[in-house]
Image (spheres, grey):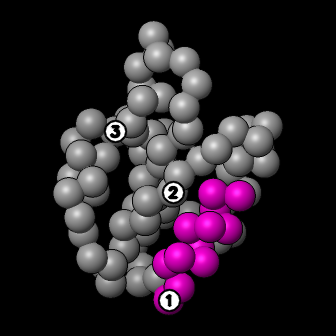
Amino acid sequence: MRRECGSTARVRLFGSRLDDSRRGGDVDLLIELDNPVERPALLSARLSALISRSLGGRRVDVLLSAPNLTRQAVHRVAEQQGQLL
């Protein structure tokens, strides 16, 4: 992942996987980048596949945050409730 995002990228786990009492479900990750992203959909898909393979095929949803990307309400939730990895 560092190769794709750089050494300063920050990763936050958010969503249902923060609750140990809940089973299953996908892994929701917010990846915060310091630099603009040229093709965010491609990067998000690539990271999702890469991380999913490393987790034995578990589904992974990747939300990107970068200076050139529009922020949505889910970004605030992920930042406020997410756990920095």
Does 5 sit left or right of 58 as displayed? left
Identify which residue, 62 or 25, lies in the foreground: 25
> Which element is circle 1 on?
loop
At 24% from the left and 46% from the top, the residue drawn is 77
> Which element is circle 3 on?
loop
* Label 1 with label 3: CB-CB less than 8 Å: no
CA–CA distance in space, label 2 to label 1:
16 Å
Q: Earlier in the sequence, mark 1 or mark 3?
A: 1
At 51% from the left and 56% from the top, the residue drawn is 62
Q: Earlier in the sequence, mark 2 or mark 3?
A: 2
Does 49 sit left or right of 34 as displayed? right
Q: Can residue 51 be seen?
A: yes
Q: Earlier in the sequence, mark 2 or mark 1?
A: 1
Query: Residue 32 appears at what percent x and percent y?
Result: 40, 61
Which residue type does callout 1 highlight? Glu
Q: Which residue is mark 1?
A: 38
Q: Which residues are magenta?
A: 38-49
Which residue type does callout 2 highlight? Val
CA neighbours of label 1 inside 10 A, class few (<14), some (14 to 19), many (20+): few
Check if residue 44 falls in the magenta segment.
yes
Does 10 sit left or right of 79 as displayed? right
CA neighbours of label 2 inside 10 A, class few (<14), some (14 to 19), many (20+): many
Query: Residue 47 appears at what percent x and percent y?
Result: 64, 62
> Which element is circle 2 on?
strand
Q: Which residue is mark 3?
A: 82
CA–CA distance in space, label 1 to label 3:
25 Å
Compared with 38, 71 (above or below) is above
Q: Which residue is mark 2?
A: 62
Query: Residue 43 appears at what percent x and percent y?
Result: 59, 73
Corner quadrant of residue 45: bottom right
CA neighbours of label 3 inside 10 A, class few (<14), some (14 to 19), many (20+): some
